[in-house]
Amino acid sequence: MQKILVIHGPNLALLGEREVNVYGKVTLSQINKGLEKIAKEQKVALKIFQSNHEGKIVDIIGKAKRDGFNAILINPAAYTHTSVAIRDALAAIKLPTIEVHLSNIYSREEFRQHSLISAVATGQICGFGAESYYLGLLACCKILKK
Ligand code: DQA
């Protein structure tokens, strides 16, 4: 069975109570349940990881290949716009990677309109709320079936 690593970056554990006007009322555990349902239907295995710490995210990406993962689904959250370290980790392991965001980062503040991650990702999906994750997981599955 193909294995997909799902990474939620900083502050995403606060979904549901955090800036609901931007991110909506959906919680991270509801998103994770939705992802698990799709994974079951698509017959892939998921490991879901959330961290507020850049180094921990770099560590799990760095060993993703050794740990047998075939693809990565990542919402790097605020690190999207700042983290050369996460970008370099993804570039190093070269696994198919889908970057997702709940909000449309290109219609928000200027500092959010640039992603350091997208150049090393296979593709990016943003602006669909929780659906961005579900579309992102389906994109991972499509790539793995090619
Ligand atoms: C986000 C967008 C980022 O700019 C922000 O820092 C987040 C969430 C999103 O999913 O829309 O924390 O990645």
Image (cartoon, grey):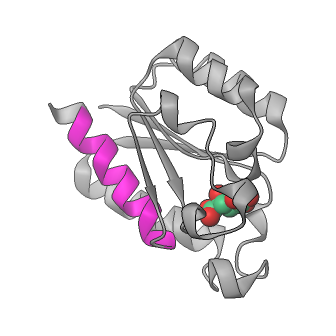
- The image quadrant where one finds the N terminus is top left
Q: x, y (%) of residue 95?
A: 43, 22
Q: In this rendering, would 21 be left or right of 5?
A: right
Q: Is residue 132 magenta?
A: yes
**Which residue is rendered at x = 71% and y = 60% of the image?**
110
**Res. 102 visible in picture:** no
Chain part drawn in magenta: 129-143
Q: Residue at x 51, y 53 (%)?
A: 100
Looking at the magenta stretch, what is its main secondary structure? Answer: helix
Q: Magenta stretch containing residue 67, yes or no?
A: no
Residue 106 location, x and y as percent? 56, 62
Relative height, residue 122 to residue 129 (above, below): above
Q: Residue furthest left?
A: 146
Query: Residue 124 at x, y = what percent?
Result: 43, 48
Q: Position of residue 27 (x, y in %)?
A: 65, 75
Ligand 1 is found in the corner quadrant, namely bottom right
